[in-house]
């Protein structure tokens, strides 16, 4: 028999840690290779983690609620093999360990975790009772962030704990506001705005926010703080789009076995406009503008729980309308079934929110950081409109919708933001009624 360490796997390009939500197997139970044994949450998605080896779950090293870095051990599996090994190239660990080495390891761990500060006045547990991980304290030391500043941050981790992503987002904000890396902050940190007290009566129901709702709240507040939002509106005549879709939707469903909605048609127009105005497809890194080569469209998707998730259509400019349609339907379905992979929730360069699906005519969406723009698609409505003809102007019934374009005024001015949304409308209004899909 041999003992094999199972480590926290890498679950995406920028995912460096995961929170153990629940163990699906108990110590002593037999497990098969690739059988799901625990559920892990990252800042991107919740996912089940399969066993790396077949055998018996000998020991659980990471408890529910623990935040574990990628590559760190989470369990020990007892296998039938002759030698011990570890998944993902990590060094193996025998269950049996020399008592002296074990004692030294425990002592070193105790010293590291009970240290009063990281050399920059950052305690492991602040006077407010807040816990800071060694990784967060290390970053705080490197960036000269005080305990007062850390205590003012809203954490997205378990029980409001400040995570690596939280402190890195704060560092980026400090850079934008003029603070330099390695230079102590001389001015007082921004005041923490406390919410107004809420009066609760005996008849009121108190609902605890789930982890995803807390994360959404944190990111939306952060986005408003980071980006000065401006919104431009255009009303587009989509009569041709409506006529064409009504003509092809039934043959399309019979042929492909799925629906053709308006969303992929609108995304196609946005992709075309991005190619005309590539400075919409940028991100801000301090005082630098990163012009993204890929056009990756995020599509805000409502979940049955009422929360929101944003799967990404990667390289949307390389897909046909049929390809975009397939992607939209697949991602939306798997989002509702909680089957998205971490990589499918990152890398977006522009986001679309279809508020029209809820009957809303327009909206002022909040930018998904680090992107600089987002478009809300309003409901399509029939309206009386002036129609220009060779015989003169007439009143006719047209299908129209509002496009609401929110953008980051740090790098996108009104001219660019307005011309972009107008270009999207132009593509929709010039839709080819004879095209095939």
Image (cartoon, rainbow, N blue to C red):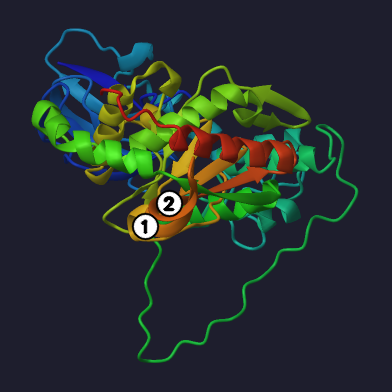
Q: Which mark is residue 400?
A: 2
Residue 295, image x, y percentages: 50, 23
Residue 158, image x, y percentages: 45, 52
Quadrant containing the N terminus in the rendered view: top left
Report the residue that reaches farthest toward the front.
Answer: 391
The residue indicated by pointer 1 is 382
Near-viewer residue (326 or 306): 326
Near-viewer residue (200 or 50): 200
Say if mark 1 contacts mark 2, CB within 8 Å: yes
Quadrant containing the C terminus in the rendered view: top left
Near-viewer residue (185 or 362): 362
Tell me the element at label 1.
strand
Q: Which mark is residue 23?
A: none
For image coordinates 48% across by 44% down, the residue present is 391
Residue 59, image x, y percentages: 25, 34
Give the quadrant of residue 343.
top left
Tell me the element at label 2.
strand
Give the quadrant of residue 119.
top right
């Amino acid at each position: 028999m041999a003992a094999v360490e199972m480590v926290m796997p890498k679950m995406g390009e920028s995912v460096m840690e995961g929170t153990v939500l629940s163990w699906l197997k108990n110590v002593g139970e037999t497990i098969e290779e690739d059988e799901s044994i625990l559920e892990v949450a990252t800042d991107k998605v919740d996912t089940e983690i399969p066993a790396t080896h077949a055998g018996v779950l000998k020991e659980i090293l990471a408890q529910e609620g623990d935040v574990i870095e990628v590559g760190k051990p989470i369990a020990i599996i007892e296998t039938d093999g002759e030698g011990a090994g570890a998944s993902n190239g990590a060094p193996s660990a025998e269950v049996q360990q020399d008592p002296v080495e074990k004692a030294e390891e425990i002592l070193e761990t105790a010293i590291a975790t009970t240290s009063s500060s990281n050399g920059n006045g950052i305690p492991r547990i602040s006077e407010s009772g807040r816990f800071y991980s060694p990784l967060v304290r290390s970053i705080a030391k490197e960036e000269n962030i005080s305990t007062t500043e850390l205590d003012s941050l809203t954490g997205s981790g378990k029980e409001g704990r400040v995570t690596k992503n939280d402190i890195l987002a704060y560092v980026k904000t400090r850079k934008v506001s003029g603070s330099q890396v390695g230079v102590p902050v001389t001015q007082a940190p921004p005041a923490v705005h406390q919410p107004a007290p809420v009066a609760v009566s005996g008849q009121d129901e108190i609902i605890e926010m789930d982890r995803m709702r807390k994360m959404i709240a944190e990111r939306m507040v952060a986005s408003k703080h980071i980006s000065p939002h401006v919104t431009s509106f255009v009303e587009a005549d989509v009569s041709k789009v409506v006529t064409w879709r009504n003509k092809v939707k039934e043959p399309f469903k019979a042929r492909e076995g799925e629906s053709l909605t308006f969303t992929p048609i609108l995304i196609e127009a946005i992709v075309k406009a991005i190619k005309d105005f590539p400075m919409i497809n940028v991100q801000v890194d301090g005082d630098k503008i990163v012009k993204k080569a890929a056009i990756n469209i995020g599509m805000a998707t409502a979940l049955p729980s009422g929360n929101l998730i944003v799967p990404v259509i990667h390289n949307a400019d390389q897909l046909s309308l049929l390809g975009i349609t397939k992607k939209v339907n697949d991602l939306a379905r798997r989002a509702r079934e909680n089957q998205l992979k971490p990589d499918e929730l990152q890398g977006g360069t522009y986001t679309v929110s279809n508020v029209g699906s809820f009957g809303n005519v327009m909206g002022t969406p909040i930018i998904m950081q680090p992107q600089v723009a987002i478009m809300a698609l309003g409901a399509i409505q029939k309206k009386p409109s002036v129609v220009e003809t060779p015989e003169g102007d007439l009143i006719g019934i047209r299908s129209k919708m509002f496009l609401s374009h929110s953008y980051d005024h740090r790098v996108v001015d009104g001219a660019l933001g307005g011309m972009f949304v107008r270009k999207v409308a132009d593509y929709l209004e010039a839709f080819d009624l004879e095209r095939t899909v």
